[in-house]
């Protein structure tokens, strides 16, 4: 009889524990945030937790605006790489939530003609072995963090934080007029945007806590855009633009 009573007591305890667990929020998976260096390695090698854009290796007015440079110098080369990392997955009051970090890099090669074949090489061999990633003059990079959750069967997301900056490898290049714009647009929160003008070559901003979620299953856009004016030597200037966004429909 004592054994029966003890078994019943233990069963009751286990049932209570199970009921308690189902009533509270719990984390399913947490990943350690990768360093900028490790994210860069992932980006140039095509490693990502989510589908991202393929490397974009081209000169474009979407990347460089107001371009004026000494005609004796070759045209700059531009390469972009992107990677995403899922940082956290959890269930909150029965709602699945996810935290994602997207990191994007933009490498600018200015006037080293000896590396003019780097773009062609990059498209035909393993990206991690290419000298292109070691030969840039300026690198712009940014990260944006966003959360997703399912509401009434619809996946929604919102930006929570952005970080980034500009790295100079060519000492003849100087930076000015830095600008960072973070924001979201879409249903039902419409447009939410904030502009910053950092005074240094790195930045970190939290999105306003009042910003709401937008549907990721209809037309939307969320992320961070950066812009900076660069001067090369005594005469060449250009404006570098990096767009790091989650847009479109799921």
Image: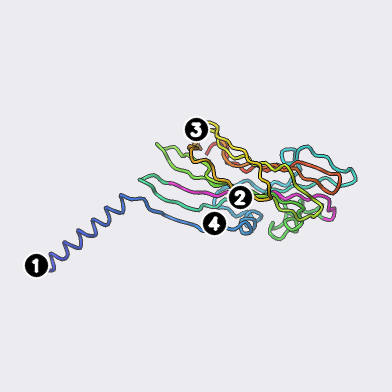
Badge 3: residue crowd in 10 Å (few <14, some 14–19, many ≥20): some
Residue 67 in the magenta stretch? The answer is no
Residue 98 in the magenta stretch? The answer is yes
Asked whether 47 or 247 is in front, the reply is: 247
Please name the residue that numbered disc 3 is placed on: 189
Seen at 71% across and 53% down, the residue is: 167
On the picture, is 108 further left or further right than 13? right
**Mark 1 vs 2, N-terminal side:** 1
Asked whether 183 or 154 is in front, the reply is: 183
Give the quarter of the figure containing the N terminus: bottom left
**Mark 3 vs 2, N-terminal side:** 2
Please name the residue that numbered disc 1 is placed on: 1
Which label sits in the foreground, 1 or 4?
Answer: 4
Spot occupied by residue 126 in the image (x, y as percentages of width and height) = 69, 58
Which label sits in the foreground, 3 or 1?
Answer: 3
- Marks 4 and 2, Cα distance to the nearest angstrom? 11 Å
Extreme residue in the front direction: 199
Please name the residue that numbered disc 4 is placed on: 33
In this picture, which residue range is highlighted in magenta? 97-114
Asked whether 52 or 99 is in front, the reply is: 99
**Mark 3 vs 1, N-terminal side:** 1
- Marks 1 and 4, Cα distance to the nearest angstrom? 54 Å
Please name the residue that numbered disc 2 is placed on: 103
Q: Main secondary structure of the magenta part?
A: strand
């Amino acid at each position: 009889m004592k054994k029966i009573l003890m078994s019943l007591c233990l069963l009751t305890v286990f049932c209570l524990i199970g009921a308690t667990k189902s009533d509270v929020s719990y984390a399913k998976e947490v990943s350690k945030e990768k360093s900028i260096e490790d994210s860069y390695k992932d980006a140039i090698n095509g490693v990502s937790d989510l589908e991202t854009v393929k490397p974009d290796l081209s000169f474009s007015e979407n990347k460089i605006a107001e371009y004026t440079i000494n005609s004796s110098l070759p045209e700059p080369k531009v390469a972009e790489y992107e990677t995403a990392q899922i940082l956290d997955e959890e269930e909150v009051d029965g709602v699945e939530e996810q935290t994602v970090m997207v990191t994007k890099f933009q490498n600018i090669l200015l006037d080293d003609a000896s590396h003019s074949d780097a773009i062609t090489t990059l498209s035909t061999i393993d990206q991690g072995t290419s000298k292109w990633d070691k030969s840039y003059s300026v690198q712009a990079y940014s990260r944006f963090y966003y959360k997703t959750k399912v509401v009434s069967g619809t996946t929604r997301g919102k930006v929570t934080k952005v970080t980034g900056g500009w790295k100079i490898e060519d000492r003849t290049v100087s930076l000015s007029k830095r600008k960072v714009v973070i924001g979201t647009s879409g249903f039902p929160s419409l447009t939410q945007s904030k502009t910053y003008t950092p005074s240094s070559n790195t930045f970190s901003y939290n999105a306003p806590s009042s910003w709401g979620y937008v549907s990721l299953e209809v037309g939307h856009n969320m992320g961070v855009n950066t812009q900076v004016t660069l001067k090369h030597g005594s005469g060449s200037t250009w404006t570098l633009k990096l767009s790091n966004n989650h847009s479109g429909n799921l």
